[in-house]
Image (cartoon, helix red, strand yellow):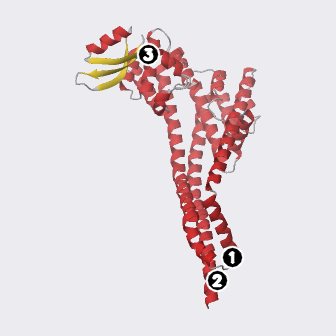
Amino acid sequence: MPVFEYSALTAEGKKIKGIVDAESILAARQKLRESSTYPIDLKETSAQLRAEAPLGISIGSFMKKVGLREVSVMTRQLATLLDAGLPLVQSLNVIITQTVNPQFKKTLAQVKEEVNEGNSLAQSISHYPAVFSPFYVNMVRAGEASGTLNVVLDRLADFNESQQIMRGKVRAALTYPAFMFIIGSAVLFFMTTFIVPKITGIFEEMHQSLPGITIILIAVSNFFRFYWFLIIIFIAVLVLGLRHYFTKTIKGQYHWDRLKITVPFIGALIHRMAMARFSRTLGTLLQSGVPLLTALAIVKNVVDNRLIADVINKASGDVEEGQSLSGTLGQSPLIPPLMIQMIAVGEQSGNLEAMLYKVANSYESEVESNITVMTSMLEPLMILVMGLFVAFIVLSILLPIFEMNQLVR
């Protein structure tokens, strides 16, 4: 059944917007009038949604894109409704009425239409890759094939929520240091460009020989005052150039992914996060009935690192030829020995999913504790660096003053 987007007036004269499903545009108008709603504009959204599916959003809805949290909430609601015995189409209809995001609402309405026409849920949501990832689609497909869609949706919701919690902890831990860096840089820039010139100008007017540290401060201050635009241009060109190299070229993407996991301190943290994501995603897929080779093909796209993805891709080929997963992964130095041992134990005991969950829990706990330690060290380090800059400015100003006092005496 087609889905129509409308703008209409209520009986009280209030303008509203929404969607309605009907057999035709005339039926949609009649349906709206029966609910005391008088349409002003009415258009079918099916073709529009299909055209926007690769991007997931249109220009007009840029600020209303569908987020992971919204998909997670919808998944939990759908699992609850199916578990209560409601049919799939009716469950989707209930969720659509409760969805606030207009873009997500239209997407779900189109999914409901396709399901109502006889398509499977997995097939329907696969048309919207910007909203539903391949991981999500394959999980739903496995749930439908095994007749446990409500259970699989619950696992999906748990997985999404755990990912949100981990991201939230990382962002929360890095917010305060980032705020301190921005504020500190702004204060130092203000002191260098506005405060320092007024004070050092007095020394220049006296034609007194200045200490080397003061000469350096004056030179830095003058450069920031008169050539600040060159700094901005240089930073902009550098950022754009590096961004193009690291994101648009294959060689640059590999260099960036290698840098991410080898840079001191942060690299080890990013590597553990990738391993935790790999373990939890693979465990979730296998527990939901997705075949190992299919699961590996999905997991390589969620680790967010081409080097690790290549290792997983090679492992998939080796497993297809009959090798064990632990054996082929153990050939790469990018896979930690702990993970290899746990996977080997899981393969031998026939409980690979549980071992993968334990690995994920272990690495997630390690990441959380490392972030706490790193941020606790980062804050005093930033204060120390800012203090050194301020001490440099103060010393550069005080030394000429001390020399002036000596001359007066």
Question: In the shown orientation, is residue 226 left or right of residue 16?
Answer: right
Which residue corresponds to mark 1?
A: 211
Position of residue 265 relative to residue 132, above or below, is: below
Residue sitting at the far bottom: 409
Indicate the amino acid at tag 3.
Lys
Check disc 3: other Cα within 10 Å, few if <14, some if 14-19, many if 20+: many
Indicate the amino acid at tag 2.
Glu
In the rendered structure, which disc, 2 or 3, sits on the residue that comes first in sequence?
3
In the rendered structure, which disc, 1 or 2, sits on the residue that comes first in sequence?
1
Indicate the amino acid at tag 1.
Pro
Taking depth in this image into account, of 201 and 359 the one nearest to the observer is: 201
Check disc 1: other Cα within 10 Å, few if <14, some if 14-19, many if 20+: few
Q: Secondary structure beneath disc 2?
A: helix
CB under 8 Å between discs 1 and 2: yes
In the rendered structure, which disc, 1 or 3, sits on the residue that comes first in sequence?
3
Question: In the shown orientation, is residue 89 left or right of residue 203?
Answer: left
Image-quadrant location for residue 272: top right
Residue beneath the point at 52% across and 32% down: 159
Counting from the top left corner in percent of width and height, residue 2 is at 42, 12
Which residue corresponds to mark 3?
A: 112
Which residue corresponds to mark 2?
A: 403
Taking depth in this image into account, of 254 and 193 the one nearest to the observer is: 193
